[in-house]
Image: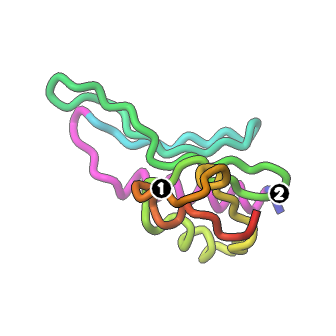
């Protein structure tokens, strides 16, 4: 199961990296570390005099579930579900310790199942 999760996540992040706008000084890269099961989409570079280094997506596979550490998109979860990952296998690491939803989170960072 984890192999297919790894593949689905890596393929999705690579597609997102290709779709995101690239300028001459800011790039979006997919980082897929299968040794630690960390998967990130990151913006890197410069705009004028400002350094850009932000995480768009961070997922981890832990105990055969996908922990959403950060999701700055509105489509990631649906895209992964379309690739065959059951909705019940997503865990929101961000909202897990919150009693109220954070209004700044993507709707997909909120818990999908009861903790």
The part of the image, by quadrant, that contains residue 16 is: bottom left
Query: What label does residue 76 carry, if any?
Result: none
Disc 1: which residue = 102
Q: Say which element carries label 1.
A: loop
Please name the residue shown 66% across and 42% down the image.
Answer: 38
Location of mark 2 (residue): 64
In this rendered view, identify the residue nearer to me: 60 or 14.
60
Location of the C terminus by quadrant is bottom right
Looking at the rendering, the stretch of residues picked out in magenta corresponds to 3-25
**Residue 17, percent from left and from top:** 42, 51
Task: Tell me the residue at 45%/61% (across/down).
Answer: 106
Q: Tell me the element at label 2.
A: loop
Q: Is residue 75 above or below residue 38?
A: below
Label tally: 2
Q: Residue at x 65, y 69 (%)?
A: 112
Q: Main secondary structure of the magenta part?
A: helix
């Amino acid at each position: 199961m984890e192999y297919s999760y790894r593949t689905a996540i890596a393929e999705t992040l690579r597609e997102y990296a290709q779709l995101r706008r690239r300028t001459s000084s800011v790039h979006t890269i997919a980082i897929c570390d299968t040794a630690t099961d960390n998967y990130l989409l990151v913006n890197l570079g410069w705009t004028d005099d400002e350094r850009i280094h932000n995480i768009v997506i961070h997922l981890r596979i832990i105990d055969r579930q996908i922990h959403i550490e950060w999701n700055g998109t509105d489509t990631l979860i649906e895209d992964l579900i379309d690739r065959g990952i059951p909705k019940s296998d997503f865990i929101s690491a961000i909202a897990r310790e919150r009693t109220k939803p954070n209004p700044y989170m993507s709707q997909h960072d909120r818990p999908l199942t009861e903790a």
